[in-house]
Amino acid sequence: DVKVTQSSRYLVKRTGEKVFLECVQDMDHENMFWYRQDPGLGLRLIYFSYDVKMKEKGDIPEGYSVSREKKERFSLILESASTNQTSMYLCASSFSGGARETQYFGPGTRLLVL
Amino acid sequence: EDQVTQSPEALRLQEGESSSLNCSYTVSGLRGLFWYRQDPGKGPEFLFTLYSAGEEKEKERLKATLTKKESFLHITAPKPEDSATYLCAVQAPGGGNKLTFGTGTQLKVEL
C-alpha cells in the first residue's frame, strides 16, 4: 500500500513564526505536492516537485516555500506565518507517466495561526 | 483555465436510496478525471481514474462514468458508511501531473 505520512496532525503557531511541515512517502514516487484545503474553496495547489531539488509554483505559492533534498521527503515552509494561513495542509505523491499518475494523499495537518 | 464544478454541494439520502453525484468540467483535452473520497479530518482517498468518454469503473456500491463534459458517481443502495465528501479532479495535458479539484459533494446517508 502507498503510504504518505505528514509530520503533525495538528499545529498551533503564532503570527510571524517560521513553520515547517514535512511529508514523507515510501513508494519511490517522483512527484510530490502540497495543497491547502479551505471550506468552499476546495483543494488548491501550493507547490509541487518532479524530482529532487526541483520545485514548481502551483496556484497559490505566495507566503510559502518548499524544499526537496531527498526523493522521499518534501517540506513546506511558511516563512512568517499569518492568520490567513490557518488551514488544512495536504501532501500528495505520485509516479510520473500514464496510468500511474494517481496522486495519493497523506492524512493532513491542521494548522492554526494565532 | 481548467474548471471543475460539482453538484449538489450536499446530499442527504436514506439507506438504500440510490442517487448520483455530478462533476462538470472544462479542460482543454482531458488527460484524466479522478474521484476521491474524503472523511472528516482526513486526507482524500483515491477511488477511480477515468481517461476517455464512455469509460466506466465500479467499486462496491460506487460506479463512475465519463462523458466529454461531465462525470457521474452513481451510488447504489448506499449505507451509512458511504457518508463522506466526494471530490472530483481533472488533469490536463501539458501541466505535468497537476490536478484541478472541485469543491466536493458532502454525502450523508441516514438509517
Image (spheres, rainbow, N blue to C red):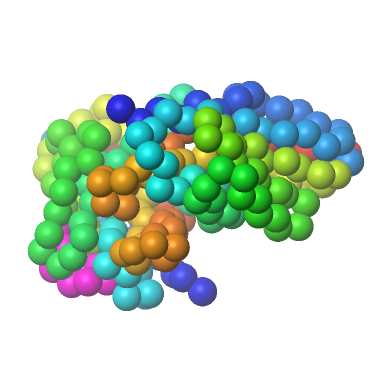
- Residue A101 falls within the magenta-colored stretch: no
Taking the spot 18% from the left edge, 72% from the top edge, the residue there is: A70
Judge from the rendering whether residue B86 lies leftward or rightward of residue B44; answer left or right: right
Taking the spot 42% from the left edge, 42% from the top edge, the residue there is: B30
Taking the spot 42% from the left edge, 51% from the top edge, the residue there is: A108
Region in magenta: A67-73
Taking the spot 21% from the left edge, 60% from the top edge, the residue there is: A50
- Residue A34 seen from this side: no
Q: Count up the numbered dots.
A: 0
Residue placed most toward the observer, B2 or B79:
B2
- Where, quadrant-wise, is the C terminus of chain B in this rendering? top right
Q: Residue A60 lies in what quarter of the image?
A: top left
- Where, quadrant-wise, is the N terminus of chain B in this rendering? top left
Residue placed most toward the observer, A78 or B6:
B6
- Residue A55 seen from this side: yes
Residue placed most toward the observer, A6 or B66:
B66
Q: Is residue A62 shown above or below B8?
A: below
Q: Is residue B91 shown above or below B48?
A: above
- Residue A70 falls within the magenta-colored stretch: yes
Locate residue A82, reporting x and y percent: 20, 31
Locate residue B81, reporting x and y percent: 75, 49
Locate residue B50, reporting x and y percent: 54, 50
Locate residue A13, reporting x and y percent: 26, 42
Q: Main secondary structure of the magenta part?
A: strand
